[in-house]
Image (cartoon, rainbow, N blue to C red):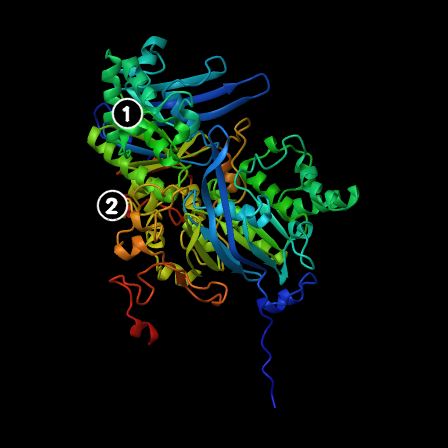
Amino acid sequence: MTFDIAPATKADLIAEDPRDRGGPAQPMLIVERLKKYFPIHAGLLNRKVAEVKAVDDVSFFVLKGETLGIVGESGCGKSTLARLLMHLVAKDEGSLVLDGDPVGERRGVSLNALRRALQMVFQDSYSSLNPRLPIQESIAYGPRVQGDSAKQAKQKARDLLEQVGLRPNLYGQRYPHELSGGQKQRVNIARALALDPRLLILDEAVSALDKSVEAQVLNLLQDLKERFNLTYIFISHDLHVVQYISDRVLVMYLGQVVEIGPVDEFYRNPKHPYTKALLECRLSMDPDERVDAAPLAGDPPNPVNPPAGCRFHPRCPFAEEVCASKAPALGNVLQAGADKHLAACHMVIAGSGHTKAPTAELARA
Amino acid sequence: MNQLQPIDVSKAAPQGEAFVKVENLRVKFVSRDATVQAVNGVSFELDKGEVLCVIGESGSGKSVMMRSLLRLHAKKRTVIDGVMKVGEHDITKVDERTMQSLRGGTISMIFQEPMTALDPLYTIGDQIAETVRRHEKVSNEAAMKRALELLELVRVPSPERRLKAFPHELSGGLRQRAMIAVALSCKPSLLLADEPTTALDASVQIQVLVLLRRLQKELGMSMIFVTHDLGVAAQIADKVAVMYAGRIVEYGNVHDVLMNPQHPYTRGMLSSTVKGQARDKPLEAIPGSPPDLRALPPGCSFAPRCRFAVPSCLVAMPEPIADGEGHMARCVRVGVENADLRLDDRMLAPA
């Protein structure tokens, strides 16, 4: 009798992580019905007159060891989403589950523990570092606050500088203004790693860098992911970069998720017209393939007063009556598996009333 | 092979006086501590109605080169050598009065950050009208009317309302359009664009690129467009110049440079740009970072990062070598027999 012994998979490796609580199949982070409305105050009595629906009913999960790419235009709420996950702004509604434990509830994960497990790298590498601290101290700051001795924290900072490719003897005592953009972003990554996080949120972390430096930092990120057993949420508006780094991609439009799916399927067969337009906005390197008309006209509408029905319908080339009256549902993201490709568009929902929608029989078959 | 000879880029252009002519431009910033050699001998020519894209990393001197064309550098600390001619004006020699009428009149510029380039205390309409009134003797009303036409020209939706809007009330894309309107207000013949789309979303970036290309064609302007994104260059350029450490290391038609790059740096830029590469392999990034412009080594500035480098690279900066079509590269290995790099076969075939 022979046994088939499967080689160690990604899931097995994660199971060896001593910090793991929920098991390899438990998603690293589950986000359920997250909402954040920013109030707008005006008038003599400073009453609330309106609200910006920055994040409106967003649900998704991130598996252990995967990279989830989040894309969308500016103002679609992707950065607010990142800040909500980090608890940098308070959420209005919704719940987070970190590795099986609810966040901020009794018998769940405390905020302190959440901030150790989740770390963030911001877009602007300069303004996110303290200009009056040498970078080594910036990195050591987090561990110091969380209880390490000065000596331990310093050693840790020096190790991390080494890991991100900056020689600690040469760079440790420098101030942020003495470094280039790419080097500063490396410091930010090192600082994010200083608390041994399990999930790193990269909010446009490479967008402000030169292309050649961007490639270096992307390689570093891939490398660190394996070395430190990390999970990434990668927020970007560059769809080329998202394709390269992500396992799954989530598209946001005006505070809502409009499409989510595995990366290859997503790029081969985008379902939502918004996603298709975003993909067409990628620039080709071939001067013969010039774009004559912009695939997406105008800016996203005002999130204070989003359009009724499908929020994309005023800009959508396929919009019909049903799109203006009824909002298409994305489906239950949390119950669908990670391999499912979902889109909130009447054209993919069977029997929605859109002329391009598949008929109910066809969908069942 | 013997057709290969070092030639000057400026001579690679067809005969006849070009509209913009820059010859051996050198810009140094001098301070008590150090001298920064930002631009080290740049030469190019640009005809009327042509678009030149200057590609390079931050610190390659591309913006400094462009600002020199408008003489925007502080006089006390800047040493500018060489020839810069726009039309009949010699930029290095004209007096300050003429220069002021050139700025915004004949030559105008679009900056990267519309938020910092526009005045937050004045409405968009005021700022466009101000430029019009500075250069042309027109009444306030006529200038405002012109501003409205310009906003229509750059396709700003509901322009009457936007005329009275302040910069902070507009989105990034609209702000950039407003700045293009300011730049175009006096029908310049040379438009300088310093990374005008870098701070924008991909969807808005392409809108602005399409708009700029259309306006450039319609108004017959020459344009120098600085960017670090090769995809942007592919969209808008006629000619491309790749800059590294203050020198043009490759120059040619957009098609030649992007589809048949010769200089190892251009190749490195192309391979490190993320564009559908295999996901399981690391990107081919260029190792290291650009040299310190305070202490440039004597040889090829790219040699320390170049994987094709040979000892002779470190001796002197290679002379420009060009083929018959004006595609130029400054690399010792270009055109050498059995080397990895060669200009295209047109020039290698016997005459």
User: Could you say where residue A80 lies in the image, as x and y percent from the top left?
Assistant: 51, 45
* Callout 1 secondary element: helix
| Mark whose residue sits in front, 2 or 1 | 1
Whether residue B322 is visible to the viewer of this picture, yes or no, is no
User: Could you say where residue B142 lies in the image, as x and y percent from the top left?
Assistant: 22, 17
- Local crowd size for mark 1, using a 10 Å CA cut-off: few (<14), some (14–19), many (≥20): many
Q: Residue at x 58, y 82 (%)?
A: A4
Same chain for mark 2 and mark 1? The answer is yes
Say which amino acid is labelled 1: Leu
Nearer to me, A238 or B59: A238
- Local crowd size for mark 2, using a 10 Å CA cut-off: few (<14), some (14–19), many (≥20): few
Q: Is residue B183 above or below residue A48?
A: above
From mark 2 to mark 1, how far is it between C-alphas? 48 Å
User: Could you say where residue B237 lies in the image, as x and y percent from the top left?
Assistant: 30, 37
User: Could you say where residue A319 lies in the image, as x and y percent from the top left?
Assistant: 27, 54
Picture disc at residue B350: 2
Q: Quadrant of the N terminus of chain A?
A: bottom right
Place residue A345 in its image quadrant: bottom left
Q: Quadrant of the C terminus of chain A?
A: bottom left
Q: Is residue B261 above or below residue B38?
A: below
Q: Quick one: label 2 or label 1, which is nearer the N terminus?
A: 1
Nearer to me, B123 or B197: B123
